[in-house]
Image (cartoon, rainbow, N blue to C red):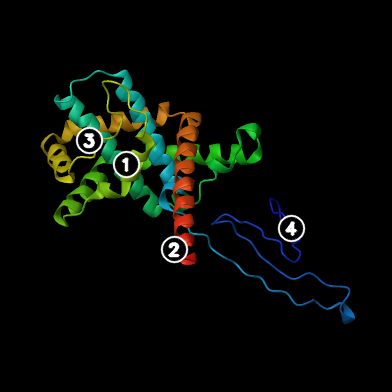
Amino acid sequence: MDGTKQFLLSEGDILYIPRGFHHEACTVIDNDWPNGIAGCSLHLTLAIEVEPPFEWEGFTHVALHLWNQKQNLSQHTHGDSLFWKLKVMSVNLLHVAIKLLGDVDPTFRKACLVGAVSSSVTGGWLDRNQRMIFGHLINRINFKSRFSDVLRHVEAAVQRHEDLFQQFRWLQHLNEGEMVEGHDSSIPFAGIENYYHLGSQHKDKAEAAFMEVKSKFCSEVVFEDVEHGYKMLLEKYKKVRRQYTSGMLSLHCN
């Protein structure tokens, strides 16, 4: 078939196949066996669980977070104005919109391999593939995210007394040690009820603000900016995991 590749694996070999890629495994004819019959072989498929920040959905959340940081540093809008409140609300609701897309689009659930691309091999096939996926997801966000869908989801969460923003608080780790004087670059995740009431009371203005934020984000986000922040987050995670593993080993040995 066109576009297919064949790989011959020997004892001890492992082949990583990203989730969603069709594949078929079979045993080759072993001429060392009588009558040329197929030898014994075991084909074992293992699924690797990826923690949410390192799925493609996580990468797009990082992209939105870092883009919003840039906006906060370049604008000097009063924090009590309705315009500013709607802008902050729109960024937070766009995070919710991305989560909703991730629930129905399996591409958002795939492992993001941007951290596996070395800066010395930028432009290789893996780097091009990651950029292509990111562009595809940004287009999905731009054309599939709807304010009405998000507001209904927020309303349901309010009724269930559910904090939708709890699942995004890991983004605050991107801000550690990066405070700029006079600015708080973190996203102010306020109470979900506040955003619901604000969006309901000023529905037309809130929808216009949401559409403007979404459009600006999708047109202005730069892959290289996200890549740097994402790799920094990944290194922090690896450090914590090493510390955790060392601690567990120490407890076990003692």
Q: Secondary structure at mark 4?
A: loop
Pinpoint residue 48: horizontal percent, then vertical percent. 52, 60
Task: Using the rendered view, name the quadrant where residue 120 is placed.
Answer: top right
Q: CA distance from mark 3 to mark 2?
A: 45 Å
Give the left or right position of residue 146, taking residue 200 as reference. Answer: right
Tell me the residue that label 4 is attached to: 7
Give the mark nearer the N terminus: 4 vs 2.
4
Where is 68 relative to 110, above or below?
above
Amino acid found under the numbered disc labelled 4: Phe
| Farthest-out residue, bottom | 34
Q: Could you tell me which secondary element the residue under label 3 belongs to?
A: helix
Label 2: few (<14), some (14–19) or many (≥20) C-alpha neighbours in 10 Å: few
Which numbered disc flags the more N-terminal residue, 2 or 1? 1
Q: Earlier in the sequence, mark 1 or mark 3?
A: 3
**For the point 44% across and 40% down, which residue is it?**
233
Q: First in sequence, mark 3 or 4: give its number.
A: 4
Residue found 74% across the figure and 57% down from its top: 6
Please count the marks in the image. Answer: 4
User: Is residue 145 rendered to the left or right of residue 197?
Assistant: right
Tag on residue 89?
3
| Residue that label 1 marks | 95
SS for dot 2: helix
Q: Quadrant of the N terminus?
A: bottom right
124 up-or-down from 25: above or below? above
| Amino acid beneath label 2 | Leu
Look at mark 2 in the image and give the residue it sits on: 251
Q: Find the distance from the CA under tag 4 to the CA under tag 1.
A: 40 Å
